[in-house]
């Protein structure tokens, strides 16, 4: 049994204008010590997915269907009390913006100690010792001094190191990191990411990395999901997807990387922009932006506009695309005909 | 810390300067001490001589300088009505007002924090809706009207005959809704306990407390709904913040999330706004003291206006100015101590 | 301005499509409050038609009929529905006239506050620098003293300077001036905050680059964008102005008893509350509360709907 099993997760937001489906039919698993990337543009539902794992989506959002199972326990139906024992303890989170994440009026020490004391029966002195140890592990300069400092006295990079230290405080099984480096200076992004990867490998911690940065995903994770408009459109081993993307959207994303462009020429772009979740196109949500919906005879593939694509197995990956499905089907038919 | 104090002090001095210029302008234009000193029959030449001797013909600046110098030494001139130094008159009336403000502040703090926090945590609960409805009604009732209604209910008493007295339940309901007026509604009572100097307290005897209750509730009634709404609004905003979400993600108890993470951040803006509001409560003491004939500064001020007792009016303005400046400075200092992001060096880090 | 072509939707159409109208149609409280408020306004301004007697006409006052209770209490005279006050004036008539006075002063004072506050706020926000520092410091000091205190002091000084008789004669004008002068900082701070927010936006830069004069930019481009917060605080300010007027009148610094507002009616009645004639003070009091409450609730609703970034404390 996998450590974490998410199946057919469905998250909605009850807004004044009606219900908006933020996430639909998302399924994946995570093994102990495995690193999984969730990739997509902003608005694809990555963060909602991350927060829903610990049932932390704030109103008006709610989990409308599916299940999240952690070591066989179903998290999405668990009591708040039961969840509290898992949050920060077995599964911890790293938020996007370290400037906003730490409470401005509490000292670093307080914010670390309270987390330890919430999950273990230990004295403040012991808790401080553990906190100090973790601060050393994240290679923060003069860690003793940091415990009595307040967040505003530290730089963004240092704060994110502290957040990583807090995430590691209770030696969790999984860390969910929601865009952990986006808010930081470019120069220290790589440093922080390397630190996180290093610590996860050292302690055999599972990592769910949510990001829009394909480069980071390819360096850090073993498997990945690509999300578009609340759905997973391609998933599989990171290496295979990066080297041979099947879905037109994934292809577009990889083509859009700066290193894929010819020097001196314009960067490749996916035309158009992500549709709003309250007003999704019919069929495959990507079809208005897709360059492949025309068949060889010049006709638009009707399936793309009419049906939501299901997953098709290609190698070790699963792809939700009519085009890929049809091409594979054509090939199979041809092979059978011979 | 030192720089912060100096900056605050400079600000305070500036404000006091503006107030003193205004106060002096009032005195200069309204108060004709000659009129007060001598009778109608005194000929103009003698008046002129007196004017010259008192320095009333000096330039505005010279006269202001004299006024400011005396004011700093606590000399605001003689009250026309009481025929004694204006500052002494104010000192006699000050403790009554301060006790009233203190009691009202106590009521406000003890009620607004729990109610505000509760209705922020459970915005949809019936009780929260009740508190919100009650608070907007509270804001809409002027202080003096609250005071009058309280007097009618608790001091004069109301007899309800809405339900038929002949039936048992009617009589019971009538009795339930009727009140016996037993609370005092006039002055401070005679059972005051002397503390020190001019300070006789209402808070050390049963009768004194009974006299204090209605005025204090009236005075609190204007600020209490404002504070409840302010605390609720700030708390709801804080509860939306990332650090509250993060605190929940750490698995700590909701009680700690609410009362340590959220409340501390909620109270920061409440201290700034609230501290100033407590200061402005002095203005509302004028109304409350008038209704209850509470012998404090507010009532004294209104009497001084009606008697055109200019030195007393001017002294009152200056003293109230000092009170406001002092409360504002204290509020800033408290804010600096509570909020770690203000390093008390003059600007937020 | 009001001309409409076939293409552009008329103002009425735009209003019908707007969120304000949509949420008004669904909000019972807002509808009720507007109805109550409009009823009070219409009743007050048609006081000469509705009132059975003219309370300003001394010949109609019968001192023998003083302190008569309202109709549901024994001893009432059916000629006087809500009873009479201590001078024998019909309470219903005098309340109608009094509400009119309160509303007049409330509206007048808010118009003056808005004129002063919007001008100063625009100047401070747009010009910045010393003008800004001076105006905002002034606003700070005035606000830290509380607007009520400022109004009381100004009222007291004006009354002492001009003399009680003169003050009473022009009381409506005086109160409009006093409350208008005392409460402009609310507007100034709100307008300044939104001007600062707007000033950073591109269209203002664009207008400046196009060579428009700053006065024109201010009034044609920036001001319209600050209208929704101004509108929202105006409702609250009308309620405040009516309460301030009542407070000043209650302290004897407002409307004289011969020409009373709701506040001076409450004051006049308060002297008789101990003798059991509670209606003289509490009925005008209830009218005042209903009036202010309906405005405050409307203001609350408007703030929720328009959700402007108001200046916070």
Image (spheres, coloured by chain):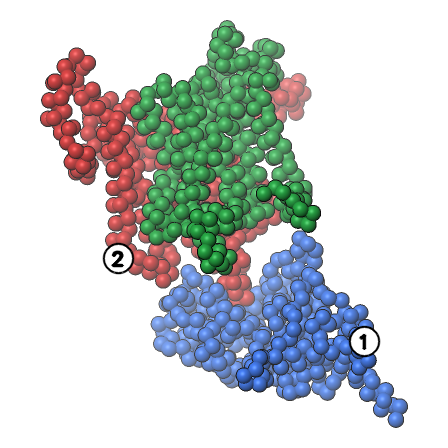
Chain colours: A blue, B red, C green
Q: Which residue is mark 2?
A: B3
Provide residue A208's location: percent of width, then percent of height. 59, 76
Provide residue B234's location: percent of width, then percent of height. 49, 51
Query: Which residue ends up furthest to the bottom in the rendered image?
Result: A338
Residue at 36% across / 35% down in the picture? C150
Marks 1, 2: nearer the viewer: 1
Provide residue B31's location: percent of width, then percent of height. 23, 25
Q: Secondary structure at mark 1?
A: loop
Query: Which residue ends up furthest to the top in the rendered image?
Result: C64
Q: Which mark is residue C116?
A: none
In three-dimensional space, the C-alpha distance between marks 1 and 2, rounded to whole angstroms, equals 76 Å
Provide residue A156's location: percent of width, then percent of height. 43, 71
B12 or B204, which is in the foreground? B12
Q: Which mark is residue A299?
A: 1
Q: Chain of mark 1?
A: A
Residue at 57% across / 34% down in the picture? C294
A99 or C12, which is in the foreground? C12
Q: Chain of mark 2?
A: B
Quarter of the picture holding the C terminus of chain B: bottom left
Q: Is residue C97 above or below residue A257?
A: above
Q: Is residue B11 visible?
A: yes
- Name which quarter of the figure residue B57 lies in: top left
Q: Is residue B127 visible?
A: no
Q: Secondary structure at mark 2?
A: helix
Residue at 60% across / 26% down in the picture? C42
Q: Is residue A236 above or below residue C167?
A: below
* Circle 1/circle 2 CB separation < 8 Å: no
What crowding class fits label 2: few (fewer than 14 Cα within 10 Å), some (14-19), or many (20 or more)?
A: few
Instruction: Please tell me if label 1 and label 2 are on a single chain.
Output: no
Quarter of the picture holding the N terminus of chain B: bottom left
A150 or A46, which is in the foreground? A46
């Amino acid at each position: 049994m996998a450590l974490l099993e998410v199946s057919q997760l469905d998250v909605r937001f009850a807004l004044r204008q009606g219900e908006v489906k933020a996430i639909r039919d998302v399924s994946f698993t995570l093994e102990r010590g495995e690193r999984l990337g969730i990739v997509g543009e902003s608005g694809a539902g990555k963060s909602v997915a991350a927060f829903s794992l610990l049932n932390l989506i704030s109103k008006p959002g709610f989990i409308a269907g599916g299940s999240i199972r952690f070591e066989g326990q179903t998290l999405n139906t668990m009591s708040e009390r039961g969840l509290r024992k898992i949050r920060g303890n077995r599964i911890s989170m790293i938020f996007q913006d370290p400037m906003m994440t730490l409470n401005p009026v509490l000292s670093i020490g307080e914010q670390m100690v309270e987390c330890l004391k919430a999950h273990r029966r230990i004295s403040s002195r012991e808790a401080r010792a553990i906190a100090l140890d973790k601060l050393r592990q994240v290679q923060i300069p003069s860690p003793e001094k940091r415990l009595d400092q307040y967040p505003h006295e530290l730089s963004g990079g240092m704060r994110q190191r502290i957040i990583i230290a807090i995430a590691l405080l209770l030696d969790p099984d999984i860390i969910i990191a929601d865009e952990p480096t986006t808010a930081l200076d470019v120069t220290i992004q790589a440093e922080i990411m390397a630190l996180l990867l290093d610590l996860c490998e050292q302690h055999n911690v599972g990592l769910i990395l949510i990001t829009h940065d394909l480069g980071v995903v390819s360096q850090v994770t073993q498997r990945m999901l690509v999300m578009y408009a609340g759905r997973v459109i391609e998933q599989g081993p990171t290496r295979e997807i990066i080297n041979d993307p099947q879905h037109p959207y994934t292809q577009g994303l990889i083509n859009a990387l700066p290193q894929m462009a010819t020097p001196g020429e314009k960067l490749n772009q996916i035309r158009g922009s992500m549709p709003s979740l309250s007003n999704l196109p019919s069929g495959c949500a990507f079809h208005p932006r897709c360059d492949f919906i025309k068949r060889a005879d010049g006709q638009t593939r009707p399936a793309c506009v009419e049906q939501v694509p299901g997953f098709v197995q290609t190698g070790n990956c699963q792809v939700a695309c009519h085009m890929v499905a049809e091409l594979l089907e054509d090939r199979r038919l041809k092979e059978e005909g011979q | 810390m030192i720089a912060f104090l100096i900056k605050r002090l400079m600000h305070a001095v500036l404000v006091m300067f503006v107030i003193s210029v205004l106060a002096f302008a009032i005195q200069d234009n309204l108060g004709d001490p000659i009129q007060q000193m001598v009778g109608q029959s005194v000929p103009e030449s003698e008046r002129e001589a007196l004017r010259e001797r008192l320095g009333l013909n000096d330039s505005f600046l010279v006269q202001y300088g004299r006024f400011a110098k005396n004011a700093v030494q606590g000399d605001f001139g003689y009250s026309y009505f009481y025929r004694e130094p204006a500052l002494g008159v104010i000192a006699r009336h000050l403790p009554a007002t301060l006790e009233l403000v203190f009691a009202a502040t106590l009521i406000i703090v003890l009620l607004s924090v729990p109610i505000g926090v509760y209705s922020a945590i459970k915005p949809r609960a019936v009780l929260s809706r009740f508190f919100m409805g009650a608070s907007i009604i509270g804001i809409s009732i002027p202080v003096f009207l609250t005071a009058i209604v309280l007097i009618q209910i608790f001091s004069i008493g109301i007899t309800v005959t809405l339900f038929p007295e002949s039936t048992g339940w009617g009589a019971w309901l009538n009795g339930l809704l009727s009140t016996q007026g037993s609370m005092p509604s006039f002055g401070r009572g005679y059972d005051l306990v002397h503390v020190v100097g001019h300070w006789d307290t209402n808070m050390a005897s049963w009768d004194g407390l009974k006299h204090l209750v209605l005025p204090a509730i009236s005075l609190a009634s204007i600020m209490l709904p404002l504070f409840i709404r302010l605390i609720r609004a700030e708390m709801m905003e804080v509860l939306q913040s990332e650090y509250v979400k993060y605190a929940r993600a750490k698995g700590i108890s909701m009680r700690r999330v609410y009362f340590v993470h959220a409340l501390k951040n909620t109270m920061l803006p409440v201290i700034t706004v609230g501290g100033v509001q407590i200061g402005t409560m002095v203005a509302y003491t004028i109304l409350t003291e008038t209704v209850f004939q509470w012998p404090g500064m507010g009532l004294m001020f209104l009497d001084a206006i009606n008697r055109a007792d200019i030195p007393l009016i001017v002294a009152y303005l200056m003293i109230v100015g000092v009170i406001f400046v002092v409360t504002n400075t204290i509020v800033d200092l408290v804010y600096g101590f509570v909020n770690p992001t203000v390093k008390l060096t003059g600007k937020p880090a | 301005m009001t001309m409409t072509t076939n293409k552009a939707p008329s103002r009425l159409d735009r209003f019908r499509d707007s969120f304000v109208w949509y949420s008004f149609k669904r909000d019972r409280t807002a509808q009720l409050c507007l109805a109550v408020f409009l009823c009070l306004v219409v009743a007050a301004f048609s006081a000469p038609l509705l009132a059975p007697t003219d309370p300003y006409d001394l010949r109609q006052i019968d001192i023998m009929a003083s302190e008569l209770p309202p109709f549901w209490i024994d001893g009432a005279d059916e000629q006087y529905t809500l009873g009479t006050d201590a001078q024998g004036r019909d309470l219903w008539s005098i309340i109608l006239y009094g509400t009119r006075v309160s509303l007049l002063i409330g509206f007048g004072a808010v118009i003056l506050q808005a004129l002063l506050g919007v001008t100063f706020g625009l100047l401070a926000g747009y010009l910045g620098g010393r003008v800004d520092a001076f105006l905002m410091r002034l606003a700070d000091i005035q606000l830290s003293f509380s607007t009520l205190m400022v109004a009381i002091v100004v009222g007291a000084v004006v009354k002492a300077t001009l003399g009680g008789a003169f003050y009473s004669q022009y009381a409506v004008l005086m109160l409009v001036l006093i409350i208008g002068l005392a409460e402009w900082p609310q507007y100034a701070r709100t307008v300044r905050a939104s001007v600062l927010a707007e000033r950073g936006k591109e269209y203002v830069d664009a207008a400046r680059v196009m060579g428009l004069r700053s006065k024109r930019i201010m009034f044609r481009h920036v001001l319209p964008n600050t209208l929704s917060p101004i509108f929202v605080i105006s409702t609250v300010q009308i309620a405040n102005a009516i309460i301030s007027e009542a407070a000043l009148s209650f302290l004897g610094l407002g409307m004289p008893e011969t020409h009373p507002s709701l506040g001076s009616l409450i004051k006049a009645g308060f002297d008789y509350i101990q003798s059991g004639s509670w209606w003289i003070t509490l009925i005008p009091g209830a009218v005042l509360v209903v009036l202010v409450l309906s405005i405050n609730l409307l203001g609350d609703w408007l703030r929720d709907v328009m959700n402007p970034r108001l200046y916070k404390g």
